[in-house]
Image: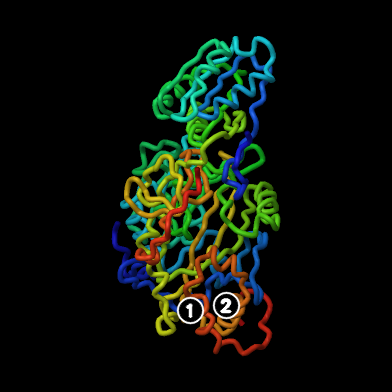
Amino acid sequence: MATPAASLPFRDETFRDDFTFRNSPETVLRAPFPFDKDSYMYAVNMELHKDGRPGTAFEEPIDVDEHYVSEMRDRALVLDEDPLRCQSLPHMTLAGWDTLELLMTCKAESYPEWFSLERNGDQWRWINRPLGIDDTFTFGDETTLPYGPLEYITRQAQGDFCVLDERQGNFWMDAGIVTTQADWSLDFDIGMNFFEWHAPVPLAHEKGIFKRALKYLLSIQQGNPARRLNWTMTVNPRLDTSPENYHQWGPENTHITPENVGDKLYLRIELQSFWRLPRSNALLFPIRCYLLSMHDLTTVPKWATRMHRVLKDLPDEIASYKGLDNYRQIAIDYLAPYDDGKPTSKGPFPD
Amino acid sequence: MSSRIVPTILSRPVYGTLTPTTASAHLLIADADGGTAILDLAKAAPAGFFDSAEVCYVPGADADFSDELQQLSPRQFHTSPTIQALLPRLSRTFERLHMGTSVYLAGSESLIGLATQSAMQAGLDYQALQTEHRGTLARRVQCVHCKGTTENVTTQPAECAHCGLLLFVRDHYSRRLAAFQGVNINAEDPTDVPPKIEEFT
């Protein structure tokens, strides 16, 4: 991969080994903080994904931030080690081309200084300046790209991507690229329907969350994408918290102490969006990961207060499922001095 | 004898009771105690049912119903020494299966799972297959770490036969892999070795 030009605002950092990942103050402020009130419970928290608020991660339909180039380098490392992280069942190739078109057009429109797309019939030229890519290919002809269409474009897009086929009134996870996941395996779940791949989640099935969520998702139409936020916590800014490598990163879960919690424990936010694709009628489901250290949170008083209250009142079953048991109390104690006990303002955004 | 399987999470398969259909042909596949499910089905089957039936059977060491099944006089009766040995034949059988043939699977979850996988690879819808669980609860378990599959897992936790990690056997199940998921149980502290309990017998 080419080194980006020095004038581009992308950080050179790692998400493994020496963990040099850091957020700039601007990136902290634009993060999609996942709590719109002082407590958390599973909900069908869907909203339309358009007309994004300026200065936030919602501003552009496909967000590109200062971590872009380094995240793509980390993805390439994961795929080298484990090619099963990107898979597509045979009937999903068309949806891969749909995905390529969507991501290229969104990025070229939102960030013309970094990306451009020239289309002349089936002959497309794609320029990605941050990654030093300038490729001409034939749309629909896999032999003209170095990878399949899904892998090609998602090696150039932050976040994981699942591609869901619609059949029998359900969505089936029949393709995807998954290298920045909160401990689930695409290789295991590929081919499952919506209820099956969510099967291990506690409490939410009983509350009817997944039935209502599926109904909402099935109604999504082209041009009207939707989004929701999800969250967990991660020790160290590790993007690839995969079950495949759990035996390697698992010990880090026990390394949080009152001394290191501020810089070593991260709120892991997933910005999930849902896009109906035009040719295949599949649903593209990007899961974009944002990491905020506990220290980052303390730079936004409202967020530190709220995080403290959410962690304190979180049902034990959810805390265990999210894997927080080793360090939850340490995080609560760290954040407690930032909670003045007063009400917080409505909504997720900083005051 | 009914299945001892308790429904847990939604990816965990559940099974029914084989019921004879009025299809023009029938393919019945069973192992060990699954043979008794075919014998029970035969009691409810209309006259002539087995004239258009193929039975594929894998006898178990302690449960061999080959003779009883053969006495049903199916059009074709085939035995295989192991499930693995049956799979190449099944793959071809599903490929050339006539439209309108009813498929019945009975016995261990491994037999049902592997036959379902073979049927799906030939383009059949898994929801069109009748299934009935009888006999062992032993599981096929895919190690999420090394991707090797361990057969006949009866303990919780269980050792991966490929990489040796001690695995927690989840109820999360992949039809595509015909396997339950195994995740290292002591990743956070490898010196903490919980005892193995016979849970899937």
In this rendering, would A110 be left or right of B160?
right
| Circles 2 and 1 on the same chain | yes
First in residue order: circle 2 vs circle 1 = 1
In this rendering, would B130 be left or right of A102?
right
Between residues B75 and A281, which one lies in front from this camera angle? B75
The reply to whether residue A47 is in sight is no
Local SS, label 1 = helix
**Residue in view at x 61 percent, y 29 percent:** B130
Between residues A3 and A346, which one lies in front from this camera angle? A346
Q: Where residue B166 appears, x then y in whole percent?
A: 38, 55
Vertical placement of residue B118 versus B181, above or below: above
Q: Which residue is mark 2?
A: A307
Q: Quadrant of residue A16?
A: bottom left
Local SS, label 2 = helix
Query: Which amino acid type is shown beneath numbered disc 1?
Result: Met
Q: Where residue B88 appears, x then y in whole percent?
A: 41, 24
Image quarter of the C terminus of chain A: bottom right
